[in-house]
Image (spheres, rainbow, N blue to C red):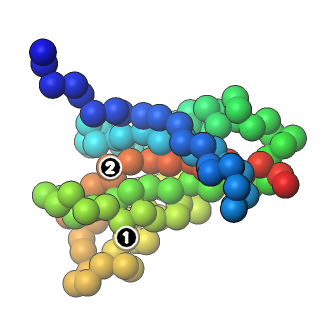
Amino acid sequence: MPASEPAQSGLIVSPPEGSAPYLEAWKNVLSLGDGLDDSRLIAEFGSLSGLTSDHISISETASVEAYADVRRIGTVENITIRVQEPSLDHIHSRFAALSEPPLQATSIEIAILRVRRYRKI
């Protein structure tokens, strides 16, 4: 039997107790490589946001947050970056600010995009 491929996208539901209920949609974007430009980044975040709004309506939404899991090329350890502006420059600068020593934009890759939608409580 062939080995199964890892999941490329999915939905995560918040724990039922202890925190504000949310739904998180995610997508692995590593395979996009150089095809992940600002336009594609906006489209991917929009698609993920749409998936979450299928389960928590706009009128039930308290807030929406976007994240990118970013890493140095050639490593497997991701750092999750809060994305407040859907642009590669923004994501790269946020990652570089957290890195020691500082990195060039070409030395990182975006692995996973996430959108988290919180339900009003």
Give the residue pinned by disc 2: 111
The residue lying at 12 percent from left, 15 percent from top is 1
Say whether residue 32 is left or right of residue 64. left
The residue lying at 58 percent from left, 62 percent from top is 84
Asked if one can make out residue 106 in the rendered structure from this viewpoint, the answer is: no
Residue that lies at the very extreme toward the top in this rendered image: 1
The residue lying at 50 percent from left, 56 percent from top is 67
Say whether residue 50 is left or right of residue 39. right
Vertical order, 27 against 118 (above or below): above
Looking at this view, is 16 or 105 the one in front?
16
Mark 1 or mark 2, whichever is nearer to me = 2
Q: Position of residue 113 (x, y in %)?
A: 45, 47
The residue lying at 13 percent from left, 18 percent from top is 2
Give the residue pinned by disc 1: 95
Q: Amino acid at mark 2?
A: Ala
Q: Amino acid at mark 1?
A: Phe
- Which is nearer the N-term, disc 1 or disc 2? 1
Vertical order, 21 against 7 (above or below): below
| SS of the residue under disc 2 | strand
Asked if one can make out residue 100 in the rendered structure from this viewpoint, the answer is: yes
Circle 1 Cα neighbour tier, 10 Å, few/some/many (<14 / 14–19 / ≥20): many
Looking at this view, is 90 or 25 the one in front?
25
